[in-house]
Image (cartoon, rainbow, N blue to C red):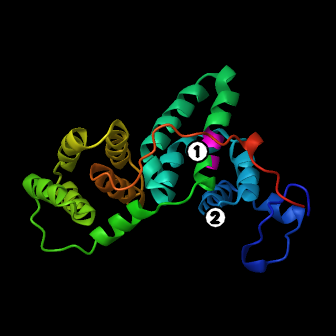
């Protein structure tokens, strides 16, 4: 193994040269590497990519923004926790003396997502909701879908209300506050904040899927989560 090159080689390709990786360490490549490593649970690749992402101020800011989206993609039950952790890291980064603490928290959170058993149901719900049609689009219809326990229909009506500049979030929050837990309310609150936060449309849709599931308490929603700091990750063989 050439020092500094990640362990994994996509689709059986030979190990690239050191110069190859040095030339290709663009911000876009590094961000893509982080996301692929989380998806695959590849700590060798993740350690390599995070180390380089963290060296750039833009990379550190991206990690704060991306952490809740990574949770939405790979582990919807952790969306609320990921949003809280991202804000905590963002606050620490504003103080130079707290940068190492921010690094421990943010990279540890990414490691937690990488090593956890994945739950992509939030993404599945939002994808299926695209195929729902002939819906009664109103706040009362959303409440009826919640009462019926239909997460796909809940997400579909929420999407339609949002497209009409309606407000499904107040209904979702009211229902979750009555029937859910502190953790499920946190997921819905985070989903509302992230949906309106200017992310790409596909990323925003993830949060509606997570909110629909959280409102109906589908799955064990994360409260306290143990971070996996980089120093605690197992050293890859070789």
Q: Which residue is mark 2?
A: 40
Range shown magenta: 106-111
Picture coordinates of residue 117 (x, y %)? Answer: 56, 58
Q: Nearer the viewer, mark 1 or mark 2?
A: 2
Picture coordinates of residue 155 (x, y %)? Answer: 26, 60
Picture coordinates of residue 154 (x, y %)? Answer: 22, 60
Q: Which residue is mark 1?
A: 63
Q: For this view, does 153 lie left or right of residue 77?
A: left
- Image quadrant containing the N terminus: bottom right
Q: Quadrant of residue 45?
A: bottom right
Answer with mark 1 or mark 2, whichever residue precedes in sequence: 2
> Above or below — where is 99 with respect to 16?
above
> Above or below — where is 17 with respect to 143?
below
Considering depth in this image, is 98 or 222 the residue closer to the camera?
Answer: 222
Residue drawn at x 58%, y 26% is: 92
Magenta-span inclusion, residue 165: no
């Amino acid at each position: 193994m050439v020092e500094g090159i990640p362990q994994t080689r996509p689709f059986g390709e030979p190990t690239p040269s050191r110069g190859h990786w040095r030339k290709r360490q663009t911000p876009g490549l590094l961000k893509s590497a982080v996301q692929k490593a989380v998806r695959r649970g590849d700590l060798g690749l993740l350690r390599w990519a995070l180390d380089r992402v963290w060296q750039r101020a833009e990379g550190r800011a991206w990690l704060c923004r991306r952490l809740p989206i990574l949770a939405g993609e790979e582990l919807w039950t952790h969306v609320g926790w990921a949003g809280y952790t991202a804000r905590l890291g963002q606050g620490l980064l504003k103080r130079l003396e707290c940068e190492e603490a921010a690094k421990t928290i943010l990279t540890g959170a990414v490691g937690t997502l990488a090593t956890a058993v994945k739950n992509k149901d939030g993404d599945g719900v939002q994808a299926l909701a695209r195929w729902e049609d002939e819906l009664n689009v109103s706040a009362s219809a959303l409440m009826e879908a919640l009462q019926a326990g239909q997460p796909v229909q809940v997400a579909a009506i929420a999407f339609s209300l949002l497209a009409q500049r309606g407000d499904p979030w107040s209904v979702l929050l009211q229902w979750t506050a009555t029937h859910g837990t502190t953790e499920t309310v946190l997921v819905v609150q985070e989903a509302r904040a992230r949906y309106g936060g200017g992310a790409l449309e596909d990323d925003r849709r993830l949060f509606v899927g997570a909110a629909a599931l959280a409102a109906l308490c589908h799955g064990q929603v994360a409260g306290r989560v143990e971070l996996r700091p980089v120093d605690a990750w197992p050293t890859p063989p070789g």
